[in-house]
Amino acid sequence: MTNVSITPAVQQFLQRRHGSFIAGRAVHDESGAVIEVINPATGEAIAAVTGASAAQVEEAVASARAAFEGSWAQTSPYQRGVLLNRLADLIEQHGEELAQLESLCSGKAINLARGLEVAQSAVFLRYFAGWATKINGETMTPSLPSMAGEQYMAFTRREPIGVVAGIVPWNFPIMIGIWKIASALTTGCTVVVKPSEFTPLTLLRVAELAIEAGIPAGVINVINGLGSVGQQLIGHPRISKVSFTGSVPTGIAVGKAAMEAKLTRATLELGGKNPAAMLADVDIQSAVQGIVMAAFSHQGQICASPERLYVHRSIADDFARALGQALQTLKIGSPMDETVHFGPLANKPHYDKMLAFFARAQASNTVICGARAHGDKGYFVEPTVILANGADDHFLHEETFGPIICILPFDDEQHLVELMNDSPYGLGASIWTNNLSKALSLIPKLEFGTVWVNMHTFLDPAVPFGGTKASGLGREFGSAFIEDYTELKSVMIRY
Ligand code: NAD
């Protein structure tokens, strides 16, 4: 056991009274509902957060609006980029503190918290910082009739949309929060972020670091609470855009509420049931390693993780066996142990949901490995591989958002495409093969926002990310986000 020692900064932060972060200050309202933060490795409370009151939601939006019209509007694009880079530097300097907090609150293995959640948050911030000086309109020449020699010109401006409401799930509280904050700030918007009630702490610390970085008070506000707090936020008339990441049912409710509020723009990054396809020529051992990492990192609680695996019939038995063997070598244990790859599930409701899936799998599927709880405290389970009972098996259609892979053999590529597309979701899919022609001919036929080849789940800030079908609306990253965070204003001039 090589448990990391909890730093004094983390101990002090956990002991503080927490609430929300509004207008540059940590605040809490005695009357708000108290949310206990539970360490999923032990099931014990490690901190408490007071949810935002209705008045605090008002204050947060008002403070973001004042900063939008004032301090942030007066900050040049270059300076905005500098400030986002400074925040990235501070996130790195406080990386161990943030990673430990994340690991304690969400059960993320400490090395994943350090190397992905925290380190990638800085990478994303720096990518978005670079956009601040590059958001431009176009010029055009209208063809209007000229009666007396008058001429015309026109141009477009990309103007920041206003105050953005960012709603964040519990699986990557810092990184997904940063996606929303950085997209808003680089385009000149300000933001009110609502973290998940299961992971309310780390974005409060990020907001403090933003003030230390020199980002003016009010530009980033964080309000904590249950879904009802998010609901009040998105219905607020001074919210100009909602950027939501979470489940499909909540996403639909959020999209409807945003529409009804005042046709508020909404981007929705929702769930998935992502397929991975193993063609006959793959090297089984290296593909198995790829799937272990893609499907079981953070205990499978990643929206883009593969959950259904279509394997060419000629290698299906060998593949399932090799995957089961590889998973049995994964070390399950305390997420604060640096040698552990597989920590607990992030919260009790999710653990209970996974146990129900396991009961179903034990009753009706062939279990290659796992499908049971692990240990006697905390929310630990075993990584699980099961075989599908045909193409209609519910394990091929219902998102588990956990460490469960369901395998179905396929015979030919036309059938494979039908199987992969047979889903209400369209977030991501992967093809594993050394035959480039086959991969390139399959890509246009797949109805997904992202198609990976010989990899899966990886995201990069330069590459747009989002879903087709019920997996969402809109794209984050790349240059695609700019359209969603700005209004296009056309200007026509006669001279
Ligand atoms: P969730 O939908 O339960 O909650 C997400 C957030 O919405 C939380 O902050 C919650 O408090 C808030 N919320 C709940 N009801 C609300 C309402 N009526 N109005 C406004 N806000 C409300 O999702 P979760 O359980 O936190 O996250 C897991 C889900 O998120 C999975 O389905 C997963 O696939 C999805 N996810 C998608 C992506 C992506 O980029 N596509 C990334 C991560 C997670």
Image: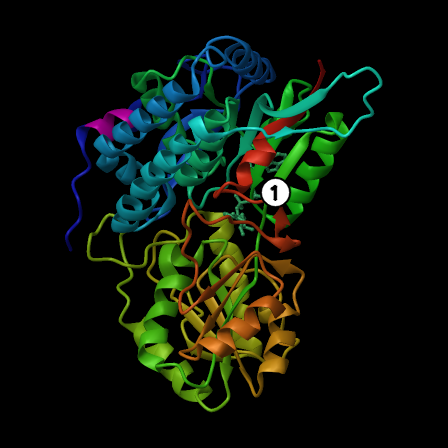
Q: Position of residue 34 (x, y in %)?
A: 48, 26
Measuring 50% from the left and 53% from the top, which residue is drawn there?
A: 303
Quarter of the picture holding the C terminus: top right
Measuring 49% from the left and 74% from the top, which residue is drawn there?
A: 439
Image quadrant of ligand 1 equals top right
Q: Is residue 67 magenta?
A: no
Q: Position of residue 68 (x, y in %)?
A: 53, 14
The part of the image, by quadrant, that contains residue 263 is top right
Magenta stretch, residue numbers? 9-13
Q: Position of residue 253 (x, y in %)?
A: 69, 40
**Amino acid type, label 1:** Leu
Measuring 63% from the left and 26% from the top, which residue is drawn there?
A: 156
194 sits to left or right of 315? right
190 sits to left or right of 151? left
Is any atom of residue 17 visible in this view? no
Mark 1 lies on residue? 268
Q: Is residue 12 magenta?
A: yes
Quarter of the picture holding the N terminus: bottom left
Q: Position of residue 192 (x, y in %)?
A: 52, 24
Give the total number of marks visible in the rendering. 1
Q: Residue furthest front?
A: 149
